[in-house]
């Protein structure tokens, strides 16, 4: 290559890099402004991030074409690991004591029930075979930890402590079950009959027990290091972030649940260095917000809005089955034995918001089968938007209708 051509190519690469930096900075600023605007009109902030991603995407004014699902899976994994670790750091052990067992049952059996009901409805309405229908149910089953936490804080609802703990802990624990079901069903679709009940049970135990052991052990080690190693504030936060991502990667490579591992590691780390260092909490809260912004902007970019209408009828049926049938049945069936009142169960059912995880999980089938996986991805995108609009916009209203507008002690006395 002649020198002039080399210089021109170098300048072009630099110019493109500068454009990307400008775009990233501009989107960051617009995301914060969108968050402020959404708060004023009572809209779910995550919906604003998704909408912004769609606006700058292929059908928007900037016309950015982005369809790199492999990179999106990587970015989504990192973002969710950070979000769940930060959620664990914000979860005191006292909260786990109040609601661990009902939250665990709802996050496992409840997710399976939700997936089964949604999958059955999809099979009947769309005429699909049972395995792909159950895959759609498994992908859409988990609630979103970030969406639930943010909307509960902004709703003004005065919830009993046990109910508030249940909702936050459940949203942090239910991702692993959905991930397990998703991979199990993808395996059964790819190689029918290759995995029996014993094999599925072994896979479940490997994922859940492995994730729990790695999370508890990793959290204990992190706590010991933080208590004994004299790290400067800036280095301490970077150390924790690197350790959380490393723990997630190790767990996933070993076939365990990285999501469960990082969440539990956050909880144990918080317990061992309580009160949490003043420099750690703000850093991870900021990182969690940055992860949410990047994740939802990316998911918005991945979608092509003009292709969505053909998927709307099927997604409407799936969303209706999820919101009005599957989630309520799962919640009432799992919570009533733990002596939650019908009002608490009803509110828990309605606050089962969907967010990034269903869209993220729907990326996985696309990696193996872009054509059929693309249909699932588009459908899940619509379901998440409907959940954020229908449920997210009415969290405060549902709290008022169910009587959760007085202090928790008084509300609890009327149950």
Image: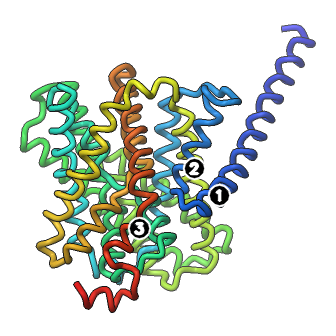
Measure the alpha-carbon separation of dots 1 and 2. 9 Å
- Which residue position is annotated with label 1? 37
Which of the two residues, 136 or 67, is positioned nearer the viewer here? Answer: 136
Pick the quarter of the image with the N terminus. top right
Classify 73 as above or below 204.
above
- Whether residue 119 is visible, yes or no, is yes
Residue at (28%, 87%) from the top-left corner? 412
- Which residue position is annotated with label 2? 48
The way the protein has been coloured in the rendering is rainbow
Name which of mark 1 and mark 2 comes first in the sequence: 1
Q: Pointers 1 and 2 in contact (CB under 8 A)?
A: yes
Q: Residues within 10 Å of mark 3 (few under 14, many from 20)?
A: some
Q: Position of residue 272 (x, y in %)?
A: 44, 81
Measure the alpha-carbon separation of dots 1 and 3. 20 Å
Name which of mark 2 and mark 3 comes first in the sequence: 2
Name which of mark 1 and mark 3 comes first in the sequence: 1
| Label 3 SS | helix
Residue at (53%, 76%) from the top-left corner? 226
């Amino acid at each position: 290559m002649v020198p002039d051509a080399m210089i021109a190519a170098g300048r072009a690469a630099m110019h493109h890099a500068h454009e990307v930096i400008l775009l990233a900075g501009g989107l960051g600023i617009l995301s914060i402004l969108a968050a402020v605007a959404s708060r004023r009109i009572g809209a779910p902030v995550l919906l604003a991030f998704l909408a912004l991603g769609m606006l700058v995407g292929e059908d928007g004014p900037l016309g950015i074409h982005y369809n790199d699902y492999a990179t999106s899976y990587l970015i989504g994994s990192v973002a969710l690991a950070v979000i769940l670790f930060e959620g664990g750091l914000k979860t005191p052990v006292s909260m786990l004591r109040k609601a661990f067992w009902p939250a665990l049952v709802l996050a496992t059996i409840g997710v399976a029930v939700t997936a089964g009901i949604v999958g059955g409805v999809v099979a009947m309405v769309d005429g699909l075979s049972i395995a792909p229908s159950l895959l759609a149910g498994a992908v859409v089953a988990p609630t979103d930890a970030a969406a639930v936490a943010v909307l509960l804080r902004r709703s003004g609802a005065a919830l009993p402590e046990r109910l508030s703990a249940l909702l936050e802990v459940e949203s942090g624990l239910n991702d692993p079950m959905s991930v397990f079901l998703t991979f199990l069903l993808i395996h059964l679709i790819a190689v029918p009959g290759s995995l029996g009940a014993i094999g599925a049970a072994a896979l479940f135990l490997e994922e859940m027990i492995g994730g729990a052991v790695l999370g508890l052990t990793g959290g204990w080690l992190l706590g010991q290091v933080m208590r004994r190693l004299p790290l400067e504030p800036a280095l301490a936060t970077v150390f924790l972030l690197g350790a959380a991502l490393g723990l997630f990667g190790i767990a996933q490579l070993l076939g365990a649940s990285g999501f469960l591992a990082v969440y539990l590691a956050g909880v144990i780390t918080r317990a061992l260095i309580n009160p949490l260092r003043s420099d750690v909490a703000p850093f991870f809260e900021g990182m969690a917000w940055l992860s949410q912004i990047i994740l939802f902007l990316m998911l918005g970019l991945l979608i092509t809005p003009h292709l969505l209408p053909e998927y709307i009828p099927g997604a409407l049926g799936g969303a209706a089955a999820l919101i009005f049938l599957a989630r309520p049945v799962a919640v009432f069936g799992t919570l009533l034995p733990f002596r939650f009142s019908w009002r608490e169960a009803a509110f828990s059912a309605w606050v089962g918001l969907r967010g990034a995880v269903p869209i993220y999980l729907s990326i996985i089938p696309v990696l193996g089968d872009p054509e059929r996986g693309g249909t699932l991805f588009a459908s899940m995108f619509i379901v998440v938007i409907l959940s954020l609009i229908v449920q997210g916009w009415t969290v405060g209203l549902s709290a008022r209708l169910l009587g959760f507008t007085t202090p928790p002690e008084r509300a609890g006395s009327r149950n």
